[in-house]
Amino acid sequence: INNLLNLIQKNSKSNNNDVVLIDWSTYSQDTLKASFDGERVGRNVASRIVSSLEQQYKRIHVIGVSVGAFPAHAFIQHTRKVEEKESRDDNNNRRYIQLTLLDPFQLKGALSTKYGLNNY
């Protein structure tokens, strides 16, 4: 992961971008709780990042891999919720946020087998 992050950061600096990698592996070990823990991680990260960003970044690209789909999706949802509360109704002032999910995990808990299909 460090090699990938270093490569991405090296390439992104030439484009005036910042790259942040969130390692939430300690919260993803329990299969039955990983989706819920992931959503909590996504909301917490969004709270910290969005409050510090203000309007510094007009574009955000969030990538989630496998169970990482849950924190990535929660990040997007929380960011939009914050923007709506701050009355950023003007589309010119809204951030462009791209969500990329790679092999997203579809189950939420033990019983919700179509969560991913219905929400991603």
Image (cartoon, rainbow, N blue to C red):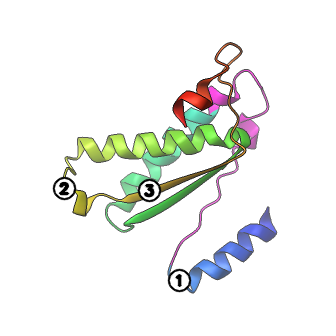
Q: CA distance from mark 2 to mark 3?
A: 15 Å
Mark 1 lies on residue: 15
Name the residue rendered at 72%, 68% in the picture. 5
Q: CA distance from mark 1 to mark 3?
A: 17 Å
Expressed as whole percent of the image width and height from the top left, the position of residue 60 reads 47, 61
Q: Callout 2: few (<14), some (14-19), or many (20+) C-alpha neighbours within 10 Å? A: few
Confirm or deny contact between disc 2 and disc 3 (CB under 8 A). no
What amino acid type is highlighted by mark number 1? Asn
Look at the image and say whether residue 40 sits in the magenta stretch.
Answer: no
Q: Callout 3: few (<14), some (14-19), or many (20+) C-alpha neighbours within 10 Å? A: some
Q: Is residue 1 left or right of residue 54?
A: right
Which range is magenta? 17-37
Secondary structure mostly seen in the magenta stretch: loop
Between 21 and 106, the one nearer to me in the picture: 106
Q: Is residue 71 left or right of residue 1?
A: left
Location of residue 58 by image quarter: bottom left
Expressed as whole percent of the image width and height from the top left, the position of residue 57 reads 39, 67
- In the displayed image of the protein, which residue is found farthest to the front? 117
- In the displayed image of the protein, which residue is found farthest to the bottom? 14
User: Which quadrant does the C terminus fall into?
Assistant: top right
Confirm or deny contact between disc 1 and disc 3 (CB under 8 A). no
Q: How many marks can you see?
A: 3
Please report whichever mark, 1 or 3, sits nearer to the chain's N-terminal start.
Answer: 1
Disc ID at residue 97: 3
Expressed as whole percent of the image width and height from the top left, the position of residue 17 reads 52, 75
Expressed as whole percent of the image width and height from the top left, the position of residue 30 reads 77, 26
Disc ID at residue 33: none
Name the residue rendered at 60%, 30% in the picture. 117
Between 48 and 95, the one nearer to me in the picture: 95
Q: CA distance from mark 1 to mark 2?
A: 27 Å
What amino acid type is highlighted by mark number 2? Asp
Name the residue rendered at 63%, 41% in the picture. 69
